Image (cartoon, rainbow, N blue to C red):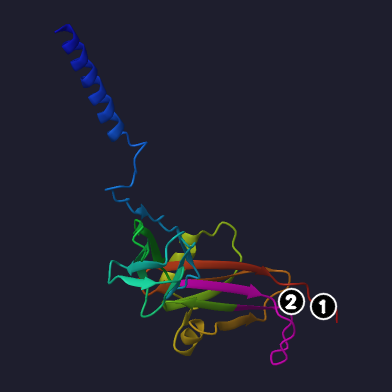
């Protein structure tokens, strides 16, 4: 009886040991009967480049193991590209645009990344260059008594400009009030001049000015979204040449 009990115990221990050996994951085939989970692709990092009032580009670095990218504009239809940039220009105007991009792959070992997102605000643009010019033969005006400017912009519906002797302490609020009040020294940009401002650039100038004097040229611009902005530049005429 005592022998029987010991033998039973030994058999039980052997059975446990055998059972443990069969279920030890380190000694069998770890992939047998199992499926490997696909790896998630890295989410692209987006950058906005070459932005104008009517277009912009979105770029990103290539994502490892991705063979294509899916993107949307303002949550519209999903589109695909195999490149690492998209150009957004067709039919755009002022306003905000949201671009989303995710990395994708046709390899079943990988699954789509999360969506990357960027927001672009297409506001109008305006540049103003003010300068002195050498002799203009048609006027006989030299650098000492003439000022010239080139203005160029996009998405602009109205503009006006003026030229004043520089007034220290004259604030943007003061200048804006003068534009909105109008007057003899406020010059509107309209018709062909406005068309030039929106394309090649609108050029004009003021002649017969005193030498060695600081002047200010200011533009008051209205964009298509109704926003109004003030732009100011100063320039000093040179001493009159010796005769």
Camera-nearest residue between 13 and 83: 13
Residue plotted at (34% across, 44% down): 29
| Image position, residue 23 (x, y; %) | 28, 34
Residue 186 in view? no
Dot 2 corresponds to which residue?
Answer: 144
Q: Residue at the far top: name it.
A: 2
The quarter of the image holding the N terminus is top left
| Image position, residue 113 (x, y; %) | 36, 57
Q: Image quadrant of residue 82?
A: bottom left
Dot 1 corresponds to which residue?
Answer: 241
Residue 31 in view? yes
| Image position, residue 152 (x, y; %) | 53, 78
The magenta segment is 125-149
Q: CA distance from mark 2 to mark 1?
A: 8 Å
Q: Residue at the far bottom: name it.
A: 138
Q: N-terminal of the two: label 2 or label 1?
A: 2
Camera-nearest residue between 215 and 20: 20
């Amino acid at each position: 009886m005592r022998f029987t009990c010991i033998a039973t115990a030994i058999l039980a221990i052997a059975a446990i040991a055998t059972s443990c050996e069969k279920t030890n994951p380190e000694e069998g085939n770890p992939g047998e009967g199992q499926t490997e989970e696909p790896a998630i692709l890295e989410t692209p990092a987006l950058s906005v480049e070459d932005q104008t009032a009517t277009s912009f580009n979105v770029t990103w670095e290539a994502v490892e193991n991705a063979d294509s990218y899916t993107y949307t504009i303002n949550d519209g239809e999903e589109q695909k590209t195999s490149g690492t940039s998209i150009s957004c220009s067709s039919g755009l105007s002022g306003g905000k645009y949201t671009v989303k991009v995710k990395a994708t792959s046709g390899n079943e070992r990988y699954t789509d990344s999360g969506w990357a997102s960027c927001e672009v605000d297409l506001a109008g643009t305006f540049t103003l260059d003010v300068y002195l010019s050498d002799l203009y033969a048609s006027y006989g005006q030299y650098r000492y008594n003439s000022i010239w400017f080139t203005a160029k912009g996009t998405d602009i519906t109205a503009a006006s400009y003026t030229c004043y002797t520089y007034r220290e302490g004259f604030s943007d609020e003061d200048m804006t009030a003068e534009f909105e009040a109008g007057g003899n020294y406020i010059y509107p940009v309209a018709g062909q001049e406005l068309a030039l401002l929106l394309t090649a650039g609108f050029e004009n100038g003021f002649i017969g000015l005193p030498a060695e004097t600081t002047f200010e040229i200011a533009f008051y611009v209205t964009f298509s979204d109704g926003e109004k902005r003030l732009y100011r530049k100063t320039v000093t005429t040179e001493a009159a040449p010796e005769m």
